[in-house]
Image (cartoon, rainbow, N blue to C red):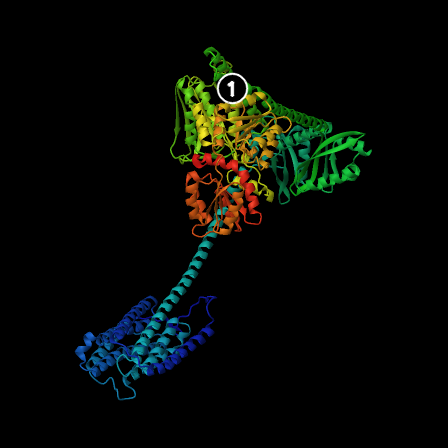
């Protein structure tokens, strides 16, 4: 039965002894807010009834069925939750609320069933009967709930008057609720057919005022109970009663029919009232849990406090019991020596550290007095100190010398005091620390300091230190003597820099002191002059670091005069060596010309004699000539190697970086060296993975290294194989290394490093057996380093060697050596830039990479030449100061069917060129008077001569094409006949094409250019757009194209793209002639397509003629190289 705790106060709510949360709202404000909420609910609902009453809203039976089902569920949920609250908290109100809402749930289910179309048809035959059926079933549940809520308040009131002694049995409440539910259910079932709805009255459903009356009574009762001020459940119960009372007083009595606005609003308000009760229950449950938690916390705290008190008492007992044990353990485990002696010196107690340090056992200590273990020298002093202690003094900083059991002296430091009982001394207690090692260290420190002081004083270097105020702290004798020599006075501690140094030096030292006091360590070199003698001192400034920071500076000064003099001598020697090296380089440069000049004659005349035109030479004599030729070429190769080594040593070797296909390069090298392999039982093969990426490097120099390595491998391998292997990285595409592997004689391990040195070979007998100078590997490795690579070797003597070019061994790339700095272009340089852009660079001839023409018969060569040129033989002018060179070139050119003109000087050659207008000029660079450079410039500057191709034939041909701008070809002396004939053929056969294609949509521009170019001797063709220009290119094969960019149909950009798609058009020079303001990106695109650029303007025709004249020879070379021999 209910034991309602809420009956113990006027408010009916349980009073807690717990303090309210600081975050809770003050009670008086909460009361006011809740009361205002009730009024607001009533006012809002009454005000809302007016528009609802006037509304023409009408719904269907489905909405009411849903509302009925929701109301039923809420009623059962509230009833169940209230009964759970009753049995957990024993509050009587929960018993009545629970049973009341369970009964209401039954009646709500009955109402929802009766108003549904499934059942209502059995009980109501007319619309009026259906209205009555709905009204009676609605009123039944609401009347039951209002009565039970009112009864719950009456029961509370009754028990309050009886001061809680009269309590209703739980069974009686359940029976009452069940009977009342059954009674109302039977009564309203019997009266379903009529009497509930009166459509003709102002109040259509007057029976609804009955539940309204009981709801109002319940609201008034619980309001007076005043528990709503604190209890959240009764607060929400009052809100539910207010909603219910307004619903039955204002809404549902005036409903005129089923599913009108008032009817639907009443159903929703009923559900809202149930929700309010549910919220109140949940809030009450939450409040209950919160308060029980607080009570639990307080109980737990009390238990914990009690437990702590018990623990403290137990701990106190344990501490009291173990205090002596802990004290004893502390004394025994202390590292210090602890002793207790009687006033007469008898040893009462010593700890473990005392016994271990002095080496005495308990048996040895029996019968001993403390004076027996004190060193005899210190016994009298120790006895005096104990006497003072017995008189009540505490002895501090006591130093005692004990005699250990092994008679070693142990020095201890500590303190002693006397324990008194009733004023009488009982025991002297002492604690000591072993300081034997410390005393020894102090003695060693003193000795070390004495030695250091002696060292400082006897060194020849000056040493001194200053404090933070720059005043002297310490100094040695050398410093004192130096200061006295400079200033005439001896330094003293505390002297500022002005007293120790001269004024200028004092300022410098103050600056150095300040710098060192900031924590920096540094060195300064100073020059001083004393008595006319200049000395150099190196001063080392070191800050003195202590716990508080930098407190001073110590300075070491060393006389480095001899070192400075030695360095000066070294610099002088270096400069002399560099001068000697420059002299050597100049000597080698001069010797290159002086040595190659006679070799040119030797090799050239040997070639001429070997032709045996008269047929007078015997085979034996031909053999002699062949030996002369072979040895001359060998000597030339040796000179070239020495000169290459000199270039490498002087840093004048340059790299020209291009993209190199390694597979093509390796196969080309194998083909070139195939003749050497055929003479031996050796297989030369390549091992290159398919699809390996190209590498950016100098193709010629990389090929030179590979040829040298393969040539060595062939030379030192008698049988087996030589493999050129390209090793790829992990990705299988990036080349990592190029290895040349042979199965030759191998190299001793102690010579693997020496073979890369100049003039060194693996064995002294190697040069006798196989020949060679020992420069090949030196030059090869130097070239690899120049290219950013490295060359390494791995070899097993008797089995073979592997030379590997590591392609990514160095961070320095060859582009760094090959790039030239760019400069701003002046207007006067425009013509040169255009010519360079469209292909005006000369071509270098390298005989190993070009097909041989030596097999062409003389008659066939002459007939081909005559068919390709004019009826008269081509006229070639040879300019060379050497008679032998002119004779050899003349002999070779006569074989080609040329008319030969010779000149022994540049001046004579220029005059002869102007007079005879040759088809081609060969030019030596080194000549007395006007040199080849000046002659070349004058030829290209002369409008009458600029179109004549010039071939440079000189010992400097190998210096690179970039230095011979204006020449169309270059040949190295001594000149090979095949190379000479190839150059002459190429340049003479390409000389007849003077066709110019003008592409511009402006007819006037085309007419002006046609007039100017025709007058200059060119054959002009025209096109109005890019599409027409492509047809003209296929038809006439022009030597040069003048192109506008902005045109209809196909503009200049489209034309360029289509033109360069065909390989045979790649070398046709294109000059952009446009009025468009070109951006930097436009220029990059056009220059990438090998185009020169000219802006349209007043002098375009003049510039164009000058450019075409300078471009003529270059255009010839480009056309031949592009594979268009028939373009002339």
Percent of width and height locating residue 472: 75, 38
Residue at mark 1: 633
Residue 723: image location, x then y, percent: 40, 24
- Count residues near mark 1 (Cα–Cα under 10 Å), then give few for <14, some for 14-19, many for 20+: some
Q: Nearer the viewer, residue 1043 or 527?
A: 1043
**Residue 430 appears in which quarter of the rendering?**
top right
Residue 208 spot, x, y in % from top left: 29, 83
Q: Secondary structure at mark 1?
A: helix
Closer to the camera, 905 or 145? Answer: 905
Instruction: Name the foreground residue: 859 vs 97.
Output: 859
Q: In the picture provided, is 744 more to the left or to the right than 339?
A: left
Q: Is residue 1049 left or right of residue 105?
A: right
Quarter of image, res 4: bottom left
Task: Decide if residue 587 is on the left or right side of residue 1029.
Answer: right
Is residue 1095 visible from the viewing direction of this image? yes
Is 1116 or 333 nearer to us in this picture?
1116
């Amino acid at each position: 039965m209910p034991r309602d705790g809420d009956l113990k106060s006027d408010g009916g709510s349980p009073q807690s002894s717990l303090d309210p949360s600081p975050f809770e709202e003050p009670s008086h404000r909460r009361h006011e807010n809740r009361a205002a909420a009730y009024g607001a609910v009533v006012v809002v609902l009454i005000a809302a009834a007016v528009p609802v009453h006037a509304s023409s809203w009408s719904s269907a039976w489905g909405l009411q069925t849903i509302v009925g089902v929701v109301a039923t569920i809420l009623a059962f949920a509230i009833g169940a939750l209230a009964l759970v609250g009753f049995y957990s908290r024993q509050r009587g109100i929960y018993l009545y609320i629970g049973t009341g809402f369970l009964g209401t749930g039954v009646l709500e289910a009955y109402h929802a069933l009766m108003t549904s179309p499934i059942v209502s048809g059995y009980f109501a035959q007319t619309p009026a009967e259906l209205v009555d059926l709905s009204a009676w079933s609605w009123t039944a549940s609401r009347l039951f709930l209002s009565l039970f809520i009112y009864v719950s308040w009456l029961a509370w009131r009754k028990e309050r008057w009886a001061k809680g002694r009269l309590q209703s049995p739980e069974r009686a409440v359940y029976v009452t609720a069940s009977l009342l539910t059954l009674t109302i259910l039977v009564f309203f079932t019997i009266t379903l057919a009529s009497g509930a709805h009166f459509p003709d009255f102002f109040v259509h459903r007057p029976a609804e005022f009955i539940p309204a009356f009981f709801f109002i009574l319940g609201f008034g009762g619980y309001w007076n109970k005043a528990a709503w001020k604190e209890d959240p459940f009764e607060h929400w119960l009052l809100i539910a009663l207010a909603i219910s009372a307004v619903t039955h007083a204002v809404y549902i009595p005036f409903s005129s029919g089923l599913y009108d606005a008032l009817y639907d609003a009443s159903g929703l308000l009923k559900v809202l009232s149930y929700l309010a009760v549910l919220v109140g229950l949940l809030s009450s449950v939450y409040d209950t849990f919160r308060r029980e938690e607080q009570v639990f916390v307080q109980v737990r705290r009390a238990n914990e406090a009690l437990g702590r008190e018990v623990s403290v008492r137990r701990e106190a007992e344990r501490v009291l019991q173990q205090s002596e044990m802990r004290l004893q353990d502390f004394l025994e485990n202390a590292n210090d020596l602890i002793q207790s002696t009687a006033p007469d010196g008898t040893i009462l107690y010593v700890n473990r550290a005392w016994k271990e340090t002095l080496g005495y056992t308990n048996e040895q200590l029996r019968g001993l007095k403390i004076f027996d273990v004190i060193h005899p020298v210190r016994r009298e002093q120790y006895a005096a100190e104990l006497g003072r202690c017995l008189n009540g003094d505490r002895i501090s900083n006591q130093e005692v010398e004990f005699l250990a059991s092994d008679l070693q002296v142990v020095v201890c430091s500590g303190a002693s005091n006397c324990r008194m009982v009733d004023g009488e001394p009982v025991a002297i207690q002492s604690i000591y620390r072993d300081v034997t090692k410390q005393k020894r260290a102090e003695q060693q420190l003193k000795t070390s300091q004495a030695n250091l002081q002696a060292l400082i004083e006897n060194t020849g270097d000056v040493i001194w230190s200053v404090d933070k105020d720059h005043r002297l702290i310490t100094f040695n004798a050398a410093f004192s003597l130096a200061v006295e020599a400079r200033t005439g006075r001896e330094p003293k501690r505390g002297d500022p820099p002005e007293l120790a140094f001269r004024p200028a030096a004092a300022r410098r030292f103050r600056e150095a002191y300040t710098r060192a006091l900031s924590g920096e360590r540094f060195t300064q070199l100073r020059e001083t002059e004393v008595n006319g003698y200049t000395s150099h001192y190196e001063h080392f400034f070191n800050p003195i670091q202590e716990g508080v920071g930098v407190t001073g500076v110590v300075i070491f000064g060393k006389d480095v005069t001899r070192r400075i003099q030695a360095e000066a001598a070294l610099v002088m020697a270096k400069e002399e060596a560099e001068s000697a090296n420059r002299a050597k380089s100049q000597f080698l440069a001069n010797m290159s010309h002086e040595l190659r000049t006679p070799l040119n004659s030797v090799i050239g005349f040997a070639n001429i004699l070997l032709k045996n035109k008269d047929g007078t030479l015997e085979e034996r004599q031909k053999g002699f000539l062949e030996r002369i030729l072979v040895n001359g070429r060998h000597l030339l190769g040796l000179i070239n190697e020495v000169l290459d080594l000199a270039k490498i040593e002087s840093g004048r070797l340059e790299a020209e970086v291009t993209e190199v296909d390694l597979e093509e390069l390796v196969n080309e090298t194998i083909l070139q060296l195939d003749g050497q392999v055929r003479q031996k039982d050796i297989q030369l093969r390549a091992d290159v993975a398919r699809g390996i990426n190209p590498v950016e490097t100098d193709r010629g120099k990389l090929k030179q290294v590979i040829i040298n390595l393969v040539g060595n491998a062939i030379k030192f391998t008698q049988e087996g194989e030589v493999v050129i292997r390209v090793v790829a990285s992990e990705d299988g595409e990036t080349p990592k290394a190029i290895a040349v592997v042979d199965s030759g004689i191998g190299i001793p391990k102690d010579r693997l490093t020496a073979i890369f040195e100049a003039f060194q070979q693996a064995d002294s007998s190697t040069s006798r057996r196989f020949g060679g100078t020992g420069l090949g590997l030196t030059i090869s490795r130097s070239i690899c380093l120049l290219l950013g690579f490295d060359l390494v070797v791995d070899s097993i003597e008797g089995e073979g060697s592997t030379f590997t070019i590591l392609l990514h061994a160095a961070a320095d790339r060859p582009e760094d050596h090959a790039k030239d700095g760019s400069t701003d272009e002046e207007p006067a340089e425009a013509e040169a830039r255009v010519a360079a852009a469209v292909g005006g660079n000369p071509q270098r001839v390298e005989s190993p990479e070009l097909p041989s023409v030596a097999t062409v018969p003389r008659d066939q060569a002459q007939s081909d030449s005559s068919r390709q040129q004019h009826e008269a033989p081509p006229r070639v002018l040879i300019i060379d100061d050497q008679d032998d060179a002119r004779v050899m070139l003349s002999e070779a050119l006569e074989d080609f069917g040329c008319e030969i003109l010779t000149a022994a000087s540049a001046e004579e050659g220029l005059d002869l060129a102007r007079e005879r207008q040759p088809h081609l000029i060969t030019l030596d660079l080194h000549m007395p008077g006007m040199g080849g450079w000046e002659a070349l410039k004058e030829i290209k500057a002369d409008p009458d001569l600029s179109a004549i191709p010039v071939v440079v034939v000189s010992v400097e041909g190998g210096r690179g094409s970039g230095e011979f701008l204006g020449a169309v070809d270059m040949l190295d002396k001594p000149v090979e006949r095949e190379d000479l004939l190839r150059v002459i053929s190429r340049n003479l056969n390409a000389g007849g094409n003077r066709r110019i294609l003008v592409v511009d949509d402006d007819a006037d521009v085309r007419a002006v250019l046609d007039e100017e170019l025709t007058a200059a001797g060119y054959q002009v063709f025209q096109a109005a757009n890019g599409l027409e220009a492509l047809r003209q290119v296929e038809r006439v094969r022009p030597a040069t194209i003048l192109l506008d960019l902005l045109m209809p149909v196909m503009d200049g950009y489209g034309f360029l793209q289509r033109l360069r798609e065909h390989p045979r058009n790649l070398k046709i020079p294109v000059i952009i002639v446009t009025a468009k303001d070109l951006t930097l990106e436009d220029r990059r695109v056009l220059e990438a397509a090998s185009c020169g650029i000219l802006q349209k303007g007043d002098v375009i025709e003049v510039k164009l003629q000058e450019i075409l004249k300078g471009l003529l020879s270059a255009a010839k070379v480009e056309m031949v190289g592009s594979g268009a021999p028939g373009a002339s």
